[in-house]
Each structure stands twice: as C-alpha cells, then as structure tokens.
Amino acid sequence: MKRSIKIINKYFVFLTILVTIGGCSKESPKKNYIARVNNNYLTADEFNSLVDSSKQNLYKNEIIRNWVNKELLYQKALKDGITNNKNFERILADTKKELAVSMYLDNLYSKEKVTTVESEIEEYYSQNKNDFKLFYDAYVVNIIDFRNEDNAIKFRGALLGSNWNKTVNVYKGDSSILDITSNRLYYGYELEPTSLTRIVKELNQDEISIVFSDYKDIYTVVQLVQKIKKGNVPPLGFIKELVKRRLEAQKKEEFLKNYIKELYSNNDIEVKNQE
C-alpha cells in the first residue's frame, strides 16, 4: 500500500509538470502577458497560478525563467514528435489514471476526516517506541531572535531568574521579536547557522547562551532543554506531532484497505491464472 501511494505521488508530480507546460502554452492575446516564447504566452492569471502552486520560495524572475525554459523544451519536443510516441501516450494515460486516483483519495480522506485523540497518541507511542529511536544525537532547544540587541540582553537577564514560558509571556508584546521556538527537537545537522550548532553542543541542560549574532541586526538567545543521544527514544512531549502524523497515516492506510475490500465486493473482478 505504501509503495502504491509513493507511485501515485511520483506520477502526480510528473503530470503536474505536463499540465503546467501544456496549460501555459495556450495562445493568448498579445496584451497583458508576462512572458512569451514564440506564439505562446504566459498571462498574468497563469503566472499567479504558478506562484500559488509553487512549493518553493522562488522569486518571480525564477518562476518566469522556469516557465520560459519549460516552454522552450516543450515546443522543441512537439517539433521532434515526442508527443506522438506510443510510450508518451501510454505514460500519459497511466499518469492521468494515477492522478485521478490521487485526487479521489484526497477527497475521500477529506470527507473521512481522520482524527486522533490524546489517549490514542499515547498508546501508539508506547506500542511503537522502537520506531522513534534517534538516528543521530538530538537537541531540544528554546530559541528567540530579536532585532534589537538591548532587548535580547534584557530578555536573557529576565530568563536567568525565571523560566522560558513565563519570560516569553512577559516579552510576547515586544515588537523587536522576530521568531520564537519552544521545546523543539533538532538533529545536530538541522541547527543553522553552524555557530548555533556549536553553541548548543557546548551548553549544559537548562543552560542559557549569551546573546549572539550571526546575521546583521538579528540577536539570538538559545536555551538547551535536553540532549538526547543517538539510539534513544525522545519523550513523547518532544515528538508528539510526529507521532500524531504517523498514527493518522496508519489510520488512513487501514481505512483505504477496508474501502478497497468494499470495492472488491461491489465490482465484477476477474484475474486469470498466469501460470
């Protein structure tokens, strides 16, 4: 079942590319367009659609350049007869089928509304602890970034005489705060920039760093909550969202298995012996 879902995802990405190329290749009026390759135009509406569908933080110029590159290759592929190739037609037909299944499953899961309660999460975690063993040393940290160095220093001073949650609540109205991360687990290699990794590794449990700055006008304070060695299982509180996602995925898989059983019983199916 997991393999089938991976295949669906792979073909979904493939067909998305085809639809993007084909959809952006419609001939449009020679006005109110953003880019053109020969007689094919990228309109403002199509461009906005590309921006909305992009899962990457791309600049507008990058999105336009990507469209131009794809359009150039697509037009050349048309000239060279790629779309008349039997393999192309077969792959396209299979991909459309996989995309339809993928979209149908999305709608199905949306209607089903798989949910989990606290007791289920706790039970799943307890029964599957080995699945959550760490592959690398990990660090649970509190991090806060300020625009103003003086405010960062004051925050650190207040934190020394209190605890993280109380201090954050006191300062939450501070307009110079850029970002707050609380009780988040990171593998060592996930901590960026590298100076943050170095500082965290040198801290003892509950110790608070000095105010440091790696970027202009960004001042950071970090507190090490807990270090968890490779091969150990983090406490549930630090990985609850991960446990919840896996439990929900398992529920969806079980739901789909039962749903397909129902489809088997309601359809005429024949599989001939291949021996």
Image (spheres, rainbow, N blue to C red):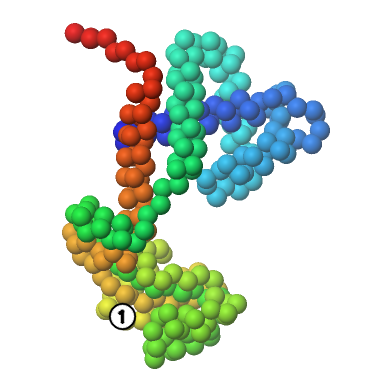
Is 122 above or below relative to 142? above
Residue 92 shows in the view: yes
Residue 132 left/right relative to 27: left
Residue 113 x %, y %: 45, 47
Residue that carries the numbered disc 1 in the rendered image: 206
Is 12 above or below relative to 183? above
Residue 226 x %, y %: 28, 73
Secondary element type, mark 1:
loop
Residue under the image location 57 percent in, 28 percent down = 19
In the image, farthest residue toward the front:
266
Residue 241 x %, y %: 37, 58
For this rendering, which residue is in front, 264 or 7? 264
Residue 60 left/right relative to 14: right
For this rendering, which residue is in front, 1 or 61? 1
Amino acid type of disc 1? Asp
Residue under the image location 36 percent in, 77 percent down = 223
- Give the quadrant of residue 228: bottom left
Is 139 above or below relative to 170? above
Is 62 above or below relative to 159? above
Residue 235 left/right relative to 244: left
Residue under the image location 53 percent in, 30 percent down = 17
Residue under the image location 49 percent in, 19 percent down = 92
Quadrant for the C terminus, please: top left
For this rendering, which residue is in front, 36 or 47? 47
Residue 201 x %, y %: 28, 71
- Give the quadrant of residue 199: bottom left
